[in-house]
Amino acid sequence: MNIPASNKIAFIDKALSTVWPEPKCELHHETPFQLLVATIMAAQATDRKVNQLTPMLFKAAPDAESMSRMDVDDIRTIIRPINYYNNKAKNILAVSRLLVDEYGGEVPGSREALESLPGVGRKTANVVLSNAFGAPVMAVDTHVQRVSNRIGLCHTTKPEETEAALMKIIPEQLVIKFHHFLVLHGRYTCKAKKPECGACVIREVCEFEGKTF
């Protein structure tokens, strides 16, 4: 299948827009700070599980100032049901204190500043830059990695390679929407173990060798 990338992207955009007319991040949050904390929690955990825990956490500490005054054991107790809760609790507290001390309690809008925070890598920074600040960046998680390779938007093995490849072919004005498309499609249709190819609206442009109908 040799479809020009621009044609494939246009097809995917049109088809997935019928499924998700207004795709968005599924982590519940009201502020950039809450998004940052939720994204830190979501590493190696599902958005669904994180969304079950953040209401209690944000009720106790809705912003960096109040979170910075929390005891790490209290944070740990709230987020205990997710993987790596111990390190995540320490990072959430450390991030909150740094935000208060260095940024007036606000989340910075630069990649360099975000990636300097404890527990914040490139993917987490991209999620925050995209969803909180509207920056056209591509956060590559397992869904984006899997789906973009299966449908043939790229042929890569490392997240940073996937990010670079996608940013070369996806028009800037579509980057944020496409990130959500790839995540949602991977989460609900193009699943890792049992992809629902028969229900896939983009199957005719998909290059996945294990495709079923």
Image (tube, rainbow, N blue to C red):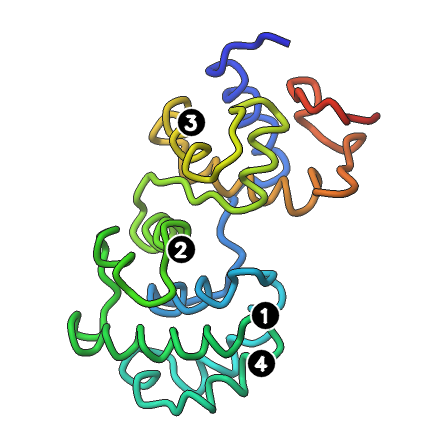
**Disc 3 secondary structure class:** helix
The N terminus lies in which quarter of the figure? top right
**Disc 1 secondary structure class:** loop
Residue highlighted by disc 2: 124
Q: CA distance from mark 2 to mark 3?
A: 19 Å
Contact? badges 4 and 2 (CB < 8 Å): no
Answer with the quarter of the image where residue 34 lies.
bottom left
- Where residue 64 appears, as percent x and y from the top left, is 30, 78
- Where residue 101 appears, as percent x and y from the top left, is 17, 78
- Where residue 18 appears, as percent x and y from the top left, is 61, 33
Q: CA distance from mark 2 to mark 1?
A: 16 Å
Q: Amino acid at mark 1?
A: Asn
Residue highlighted by disc 3: 165
Q: Amino acid at mark 4?
A: Arg
Please tell me how crowded label 3 is: few (under 14), some (14-19), or many (20+) other residues with Cα within 10 Å.
Answer: some
* Chain-order first, disc 2 or disc 3: 2
Residue highlighted by disc 1: 83
Tag of residue 80: 4
Query: Looking at the image, which residue is at 59% across and 7% down?
Result: 2
Query: Looking at the image, which residue is at 31% across and 73% down?
Result: 95
* Chain-order first, disc 3 or disc 1: 1
- Where residue 22 appears, as percent x and y from the top left, is 51, 43
Count how many numbered circles sit on residues in the image: 4
* Relative height, residue 27 to residue 9 (above, below): below
Please tell me how crowded label 4 is: few (under 14), some (14-19), or many (20+) other residues with Cα within 10 Å.
Answer: some
